[in-house]
Image (spheres, rainbow, N blue to C red):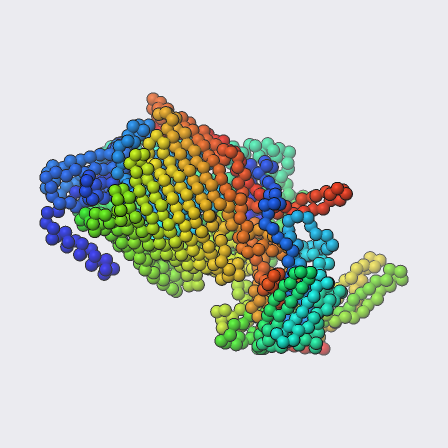
Amino acid sequence: MTRYSLLLMLLVLGNMACDTLVNTIPESELPKTTSQLTLFSFISPQDTLIRVKVSQTRPLFGEVLTGSNLMIINGDTIYTGDALPKASVQISDGKTSAALTYVPQEELFAISTKQFPILAGKTYTLTVAEGNRRAEASCTIPENAVTIQKYTLDTLVVSNFGLRDSTLSLSFTWQDPGQQTNYYRVKAYELVEFSIVGFDDKNQSITESRQVGKFYFSWTGIANRTVLQSDGQLDGTVFLSPQGRKKLEVAQTFGFLNGSPITPKKPPVSFGISLLLLNTDAPYYLFHKSVQDARQDNPFSEPSLVYSNVTNGLGVFAGFNQSTLWIPSREK
Amino acid sequence: MRLFFTCFFLLSSGICFSQNLLTISGFVRESGSQEQLPGVNVFVPGTAFGTVTNTYGFYSLTLPAADSLRLIYSFVGYEKTERLLSPFSQNTTLNIFLASVNQLDEVTVSARRQEDYVSRSAQMSQVEIPIQQIKKIPAFFGEKDVLKVLQLMPGVQKGTEGQTGLYVRGGGPDQNLIILDDAVVYNASHLFGFFSIFNSDALKSVELTKGGFPARYGGRLSSVLDMNMKEGSKDKLHGEGGIGLISSRLTLEGPLTKSKKASFLVSGRRTYIDILAAPLIKSQQRNDPTQVRPGYYFYDLNAKVNVDLGAKDKLYLSGYFGRDRFYANEIGPEIDSRNGLDWGNATATLRWNHLFGQKLFANTSLIASNFNFGVNSYTKDIYEDGSSGDEFSLDYTSKIRDFGIKTDFDFYPNTQHAIKFGVQATFHRFVPSALAIQGSFFDQSIERSVRPVNSVESGIYVEDTWQPFNALKMNVGFRLSSFTTESKNYIRPEPRFSAALRLAKDFSFKVSYAHMNQYVHLLSNTGLGLPTDLWVPTTDRVAPQQSKQIAAGFAKDLENPALTLTLEGYYKDMNNILNYKEGSSFLSLDGENANELNWENNVTSGRGWSYGTEFLIQKKYGRLSGWIGYTLSWTQWKFPELNFGQTFFPRYDRRHDLSVVGIFELTKRITLSATWVYGTGNALTIPLSTYNVYRDNATSPYNQFLDWTGRGVNEYGAKNSFRAEPFHRMDIAVQFRKKLKHHERTWEFGVYNAYNRRNPFFYDIASEPVTNAAGTTTYRNVLKRYSLFPFLPSFSYNFKF
């Protein structure tokens, strides 16, 4: 707020009220840009599917392209329907290669790892071609997965803007292998069976079905201890994850019928918690870090650039090797 | 240290062997005010014997005894004075008074030779601007500004329009050592960088060194701006002042005692935009229940007292105190909100001059300097029934406090050597940031303060201006600097060298090398001189910045017309320079790393280098005076954590920079002046296209993109790959002077941006509707240029008695 007041003050001083001090730069003087291919893919030996999101950039100046929709989620503008189904997508390990097929429901390209296995220590190249554009990126899967050593798991009651919630609190440690560069990413989810409530307008009736889903932890990290860590200056030491937190799942209200809330009859059932430690390659770390740091709307900070390892395009093709620690639920 | 004393004794003993040498020494002062004059040339005509008075006006020359000795004292703006000693057969003390050449009469004096030839000094890359000239150059809103005049010199560039920050040879505004009466000034700007804190009425001398730094200076990479305040006139009470559109100022100086052993100077300045605007703002909101009261002011105060304690001792006490305050209060039936920003510097210096005989001059200074900056915000919601609702308060402060002591000696063993040596120590205390947030909607108040950091910066130096033979003059120096943090001690040697080889009469070739270290850093992510820029020390993790600079060039003095020409080339390598990480800001309250108050996590260090060539043609006096300066330069940065490790041009890389300054004395009463500047546009990063990025970042089981979340981001091309449009502007002014019965008055009328050029201040993207022939409206993005100052006329009234 203060920063904007400062700017306002400057504008007032400069007689900014005067419109002629704001001028449009003629399009001929703007830097020329053309649309580029983008690709995003994260592969690991533990995955069952290789997925690649293929799209393209939209030049900012000139008319807004049609044929796609704008969606704003959490303040970010996201274009949907921007997939390029006609693109050709190939993955290769240097000896053999395979083509990925388009999955319309998910608007991405995929192939099963049964058809094209991903192996630790190997280098893969992804090639995307569309029209006369051709983008390419390579990544190497880290040699080994790093196992989780110890974890702590607690239930806390925390205050959230006046409301009290029961929250799971989680952290874990692992030993960094010495004499090699490592990058890590931590994840954790609770596997929960929960009800989906459907409402039949005609019959004024409620249907309830069960589904199993992954409910992810969110992480509060400080300084260098975030979800993404690097062993840059801490080679061979014991690493600690940031603190992961997640609300306990409670039966959700799906709506109101005749003034009374519709709540599922069966409460959610937790199967357990899965702790994931991803030993990633550099592109994975650099890309996620750059997106995390990208705050491009602050006039007083330098715009931060998003990492890319794609030649003749933008995006990232990265690999990781993942270890899992399963903590079964006590109630079960 | 041992080397130091060895040199000292060797040189001292050298004198013992030559029995027939005698010393002539003394002070050079201005007649009337008795102000001591630094930089006066003292020389024996027709020989290579000569010296220059030091900061306190002292000179000492050791010469062979002779039947007669002719000495000339010469200084720009003063009548050249000649003294004949016949015979010169004993050590002599000779104090000289130079009469100031009234600028009105200077036209007639101009034909006379002035002996301040640049070709004769070993120093290169130095800019000196007479204060009288600064007062005649057109200024923004008529506010004369030392720093903005320096920006008109080659090798010195401005950042953004109207800003006082100096970018010297590819260095940032934090790499300038700004000293006012020996005290380091940390934030030299008022009003978010639009005005400098230096009131030219209180200044005696301004000298900027861009390269070939003498060993007596250290602590910054790119330049030394050494300013001295006037001492205060000893003859009678004098006053000087002015009333302008933005501010008014008044300076008073005069003797303190009847014996005229002591004198004083007090100078003050305050803006009054807030006072003038208050009724206007009030009338605009006559009918609003909620009253908004924004305002801004700054003031500064300079004061100096000096006492003569006999022929050998002199005491000076000087101080500066300045403050800026910006506030916006909102008071109404539903809200009570008070927000403010304030910052300011305070410095104090106590100096003691002592003469140990005719050849050794000493000055000891005790220095205190303080800078603090604060943001405070308080908001309280008030319910309809008058009871208080949510309250929120935020206090952010950042401070630096220095205590220093330094002793400098000037030793003049013989005509071939002039030696300076000394020691200095500064005790810094930094409080980079302290934040306190309280609010009724938080369970707990947040209080985070970075622990104050104490450190000691010290230096010991020796330098010798040595003239081994007539055509060669050198300054050889060495400085050992050190910085002690709580657990680490950095000790860095800094060799310095500069030399001038005379190739022909008044034509010399100069070369210099300087190694510099900088132990305090300024974190800035705006490029503006905002007080939010944070001064931080070298720590265990953050290493000192270092630079090595080599420069070479030619200097030529012409007699008729009396012009000075310099052509210099330089290469500067800077290591461990600091910058905010991309996306970081001084106050990260809204981001993901809100908990990161440790600034060390938000900065990254890298390497920078700059090279270029500078040309200056200058005419310091005469009916038409001024200069033309041109700089061709390249500056590049390479940071492992910026731009993914690729080399890029920093924002203020400037290929071409041209300044033309002209002052013309139309008649004895009317002075016309004009400046024209041209500069290549800043290197900026602007978005070129947008795209979605997909992260491996699952958040909920309802997520449609499998486990991936998309986010729209901008694509910028390479960092700073967009060039802003070139900057150019002309300012003009006319001064009408008149001598009245008791005082002299000057009316000044000026125009800033005379041909109303729309220079870029910043660029932004806006969406504009476009309707096609079919009548459907689509939107397209356009790039908007925001300019700051159009054609701005100004006037001011100045007086002097």
Of all residues, the one furthest to the right in this rendering is A203
Q: Residue B298, can we see it? A: yes
Question: In front: B725, or B16?
Answer: B725
Question: In front: B797, or B286?
Answer: B797
Task: Count numbered badges in the picture.
Answer: 0
Find residue B539 and report its horizontal and vertical position in percent: 42, 61
Find residue B261 and report its horizontal and vertical position in percent: 24, 37
Residue at image coords 26%, 32%: B112
Find residue B277 and report its horizontal and vertical position in percent: 54, 34
Of all residues, the one furthest to the front in this rendering is A132
Q: Quadrant of the C terminus of chain B?
A: top left
Residue at image coords 33%, 32%: B622
Identify whether A235 is placed above or below B733. Answer: below
Q: Is A74 situated left or right of A295 in this image?
A: right
Identify whether A97 is placed above or below B332. Answer: below
Q: Is B497 situated left or right of A73 in this image?
A: left
Q: Residue B305, can we see it? A: no
Q: Is B559 situated left or right of A244 in this image?
A: left
Q: Quadrant of residue A122?
A: bottom right
Identify whether B235 is placed above or below B27. Answer: above
Residue at image coords 61%, 35%: B285
Residue at image coords 50%, 69%: A232
Find residue B386 and report its horizontal and vertical position in percent: 64, 43
Q: Quadrant of the N terminus of chain B?
A: bottom left
Question: In front: B151, or B797?
Answer: B151
Question: In front: B530, or B60?
Answer: B60
Q: Is B566 situated left or right of B86 in this image?
A: right
